[in-house]
Every structure is written in C-alpha cells, then in structure tokens.
Amino acid sequence: MTDGAEQLLPFDLTDAFFKRQEKLRIDLGLADIATHAGTKGDETELNWLRMLEQLLPRRYGTTKAFVVDAKGFRSEQIDVVIHDRHFSPLLFEVGGAKYIPAESVYAAFEVKQDLDKGNLEYAAEKVETVRRLHRTTVNVPHAGGRFDPVVPRRIIGGLLARRSQWTPPFGEPFKSCLCALDERDADGITFGLDIGCAVEHGGFAVNRDEHGKTLDVEHSEPNVALIYFVMRLLRQLQAVGSAPAIDYDAYLKSVPGTS
C-alpha cells in the first residue's frame, strides 16, 4: 500500500500560467506591426477576446458588442463584453455588430495599448453606458416551484492594456484616479472601475463592500500579471452569481403591434 498523496501526479500550474501569459504578451506585441490605429486596436481586442474565451468557464461568452435594454436604449460599443452564454439570446447582428440584452452582461472592458489616466476615465465612461441600461428580472420555474427573481448586481467594469504609463505602475496617482472615478458615483453601481490588467506591469483589482464603496486597491507584480488578473476576475464573476432571467414580455412590448 502506498500513501494516497504519493499516487498524485504533479502539474506545474505556475509554469502553465506563465506560458499562457507569455503567449498573450507576444500576441499583444504583434499589434505594433500595424501602423493604422484602428487596425492595431482591432487586433489587440481580438487577442484579449481569444484569451478570455479560452480561460473562462463555458457558462460565459465573450464578444465585442453593443448592449441594449427593453426600453429601447443602447450602450456605446464595448470592446469586451462577458455575458451569459446559455440563457440569453444574441438579439441582433447587423453588419458584424452584435447587440446583447443588458440582463445577460456580467462584465464590460475597454481595451487600450496603455493604462493611463485618460484611458481609465474613458473606460469608466464606456462602462457607465452599460450600467445605466434597464435590466428586467423575473422568477424562474423549476420542478418544485419557482425561484425568486434575481436582483441585478453591479456589472464589473475594467480596462485591459499592454502596459502602464504611470511610474510606479500602480502607485498613489493611479489609486487616486480610481478613487476620483468612484466619487462620481452616487449609488455605488453606475460608475467606477473594478479590475484591469497591464500585461507588462501587473494586474489590479478593487475590493468593495456590499454597498459598492471601495475598501482597498490590490495589484500584482509584473511576472504574474495575467495569473492575478484571471483569478481576480473569476472571483468577481463568482460574487456576481447568476444573470437575471429576462422578461421577454418587456422586450416584446417595445415593438408596436405586438400587444
């Protein structure tokens, strides 16, 4: 007989993440070959989308999209939307542009080459256009009855970049900028960013209380930027829980002649 632990086969999780991080770093660097700003931005977005698609659990979808609500409003186009894959429909796809219902959105990210004050503010403003949308919620039938409607939680907002322009990358000026974004939020839900990554310099995450107030800002060392970002993102997604069930009648009522 041998001890159970001796039968376990080793797996170097750290090395696996480091190799994944290095691949992403190389892929993001390839965008520098493009001289046209739009082409460079498109390639960078696709690299982040591919990476997240491979690493996130299958319950989540990732895409570039507009987000719409049952009252007839939409967000700005969001570079990376993490959304419910199983129960929420893709409402429209027109000329390659996708339109996703607000209820299905878990997170919204802006993608830039650089992490700096202007891009943080811009990302927060883009995410705000998603959070301000109306989200319906209804009860869910099951074999034993019905689950109560889910209360929509704060949509995670963030910025994904190749490098940080701050010195140091996540020092007091960076944290002050995040706090200043929070101060523009009256309800703890609508404004501010929660997480991000600058692949060459590290990842960051904002820890909040149940009311959305910032408790502290964490960041990682450069050599574990991607590992840190993915694990913190998974933790924040876990805290959000399930997306609310869509009230399809509310969407139908927005179409004249359907009542």
Image: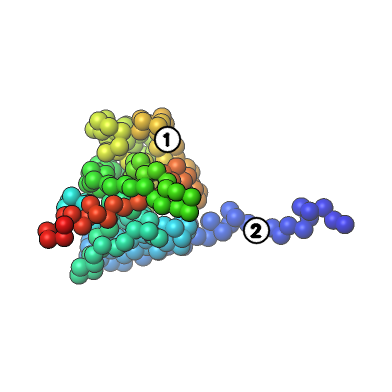
How many marks do you count on the picture? 2
Q: Looking at the image, which residue is at 76% across and 52% down?
A: 5
Q: Which quadrant: the N terminus? A: bottom right
Q: Secondary structure at mark 1?
A: strand
Estimate the x, y position of residue 152 in percent, counting from the top left.
34, 43
* Residue 108 seen by the camera: no
Q: Closer to the camera, 95 or 140?
A: 140
Estimate the x, y position of residue 115 in percent, counting from the top left.
32, 46
Q: In which image quadrant can residue 49 be found? A: bottom left
Estimate the x, y position of residue 9 in percent, counting from the top left.
71, 60
Q: Looking at the image, which residue is at 24% across and 67% down?
A: 93
Residue that numbered label 1 is attached to:
207
- Identify residue type, mark 1: Asn
Q: Looking at the image, which residue is at 35% across and 51% down?
A: 245
| Direction left: furthest residue | 256
Left or right relative to 144: residue 127 = left
| Direction right: furthest residue | 1
* Residue 129 seen by the camera: yes
Estimate the x, y position of residue 55 in percent, counting from the top left.
47, 59
Residue that numbered label 2 is attached to:
11
Classify mark 1: residues with Cα within 10 Å, few (<14), some (14-19) or many (20+): some
Numbered disc in front, either 1 or 2: 1
Label disc, if present, on residue 14 of the rendered structure = none
- Identify residue type, mark 2: Phe
Q: Looking at the image, which residue is at 40% across and 32% down?
A: 210
Disc 1 from disc 2: Cα separation: 31 Å
Q: Which quadrant: the C terminus? A: bottom left
Q: Closer to the camera, 122 or 249?
A: 249
Left or right relative to 142: residue 3 = right
